[in-house]
């Protein structure tokens, strides 16, 4: 019997490893396609970085020299392959306008941790608010408490983040003066408002899914059996019901992570949070193509990685996914 269990365990691990390997291999062509599309779209954008760097008083010869220095006079496909080759060595080139001559990689690495910090804080906020709200609504189904919880979740899903950000700054930063409304200091007081605004939409989605999952689980026979055995209600809810209801919730959290990173562009700009989103907007305003390409490509990689984590978590929680692909 032990030999059979050991063999089954090895088979499960082997299937999981193969599933992860297929997903990792798939990232490579997707990354190349995304980089080519991104490069093509940016080079079709209006505006001449050489003229911006030279200034309005510069003559044609000075503009031509700057264009040669930043390699804009070469064929686009040559520039693309040089840029792509540099990426695999960790070199995104050097900034043209935002910080002239400074390595784009160093600029990005300085901002990336702040974006990840904001994204994780928003995710934790959505979990801390969404899951308890969904549990309470499920336990009080059909009551005023249920309607109030679902009304709050509907508010979180429906309200535009950029509008809510401005209202939050007006109320808490200007009228009440409770927290620093703008800026990206290292203290938690600077993180609370942007993380709450960014995570509110996901909190509403998580609460609605938690409610539906809990209602489905609470109607199962094993829950009635646990209650019939005399187990405390807290143990029935949090040990038996929530554990099984959490499977679709965990999948949702991983699948919505890319939306958090994408939404951080607007939130960081409004709150002046020194992350990748604010860097992207600054680079677009300055037409600093290399910085735009680097930031956009990092966001693409973050989306790919979070989607990979979502696939792995779903395959781990539901083994039929990883084995179903073999049919």
Image: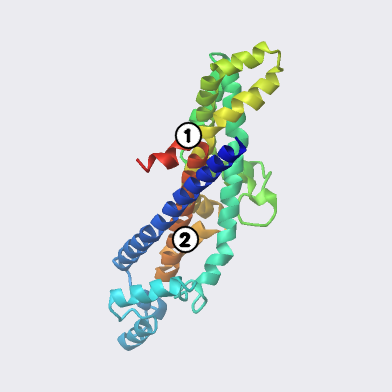
Residue 201 seen by the camera = no
Q: How many marks?
A: 2
Picture layout, residue 208 above or below residue 92 = above
Q: Secondary structure at mark 1?
A: helix
| Image position of 226 with respect to 209: above or below | above
The quadrant where residue 242 appears: top right
Q: Position of residue 203 (x, y in %)?
A: 54, 35
* Sequence-earlier tag: 2 or 1: 1
Secondary structure type for disc 2: helix
Residue under circle 2? 298
Q: Is residue 223 visible?
A: yes
In the picture of the structure, the residue carrying the numbered disc 1 is 157
Quarter occupied by the C terminus: top left
Q: Position of residue 44 (x, y in %)?
A: 28, 66
Residue ID at (37%, 77%): 82
Q: Residue at x 54, y 45 (%)?
A: 10
Q: Marks 2 and 1, how far apart in space?
A: 27 Å
Q: Is residue 262 left or right of residue 47?
A: right
Q: Nearer the viewer, residue 16 or 10?
A: 10
The spot of residue 257 in percent (x, y) is 50, 46
Residue closest to the eye, 169 or 140 = 140
Question: Is 274 displayed left or right of 258 in the figure?
Answer: right
Quadrant showing the N terminus: top right
Decide: few, some or many residues near mark 1? Use Cα within 10 Å; few <14, some 14-19, many ≥20: some
Judge whether 68 appears above or below 271 on screen.
Answer: below
Q: Residue at x 48, y 40 (%)?
A: 314
In the depicted structure, whether residue 62 falls above or below residue 237 = below
Q: Which mark is residue 293?
A: none
């Amino acid at each position: 019997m032990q030999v059979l269990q050991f063999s089954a365990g090895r088979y499960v691990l082997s299937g999981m490893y193969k599933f992860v390997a297929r997903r990792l291999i798939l990232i490579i062509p997707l990354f190349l396609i995304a980089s080519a599309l991104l490069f093509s779209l940016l080079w079709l954008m209006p505006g001449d970085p050489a003229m911006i760097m030279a200034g309005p008083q510069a003559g044609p010869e000075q503009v031509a020299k700057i264009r040669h220095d930043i390699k804009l006079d070469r064929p686009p496909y040559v520039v693309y392959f040089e840029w792509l080759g540099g990426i695999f060595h960790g070199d995104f080139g050097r900034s043209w306008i935002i910080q002239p001559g400074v390595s784009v990689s160093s600029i990005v690495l300085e901002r990336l941790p702040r974006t990840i910090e904001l994204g994780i804080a928003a995710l934790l906020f959505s979990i801390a608010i969404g899951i308890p709200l969904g549990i309470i609504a499920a336990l009080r189904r059909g009551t005023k408490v249920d309607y109030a919880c679902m009304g709050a979740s509907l508010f979180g899903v429906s309200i535009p983040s950029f509008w809510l950000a401005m209202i939050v700054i007006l109320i808490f930063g200007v009228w009440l003066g409770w927290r620093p409304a703008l800026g990206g200091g290292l203290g938690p007081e600077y993180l609370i408002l942007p993380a709450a605004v960014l995570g509110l939409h996901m909190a509403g989605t998580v609460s609605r899914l938690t409610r539906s999952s809990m209602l489905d689980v609470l109607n199962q026979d094993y829950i009635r059996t646990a209650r019939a055995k005399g187990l405390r209600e807290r143990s029935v809810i949090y040990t038996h019901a929530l554990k099984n209801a959490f499977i679709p919730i965990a999948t949702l959290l991983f699948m919505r992570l890319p939306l958090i990173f994408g939404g951080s562009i607007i939130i960081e700009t409004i709150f002046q949070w020194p992350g990748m989103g604010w860097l992207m907007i600054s680079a677009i305003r300055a037409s600093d193509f290399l910085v735009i390409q680097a930031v956009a490509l990092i966001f693409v990689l973050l989306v790919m990685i979070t989607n990979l984590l979502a696939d792995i978590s779903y395959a781990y929680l539901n083994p039929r996914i990883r084995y179903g692909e073999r049919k």
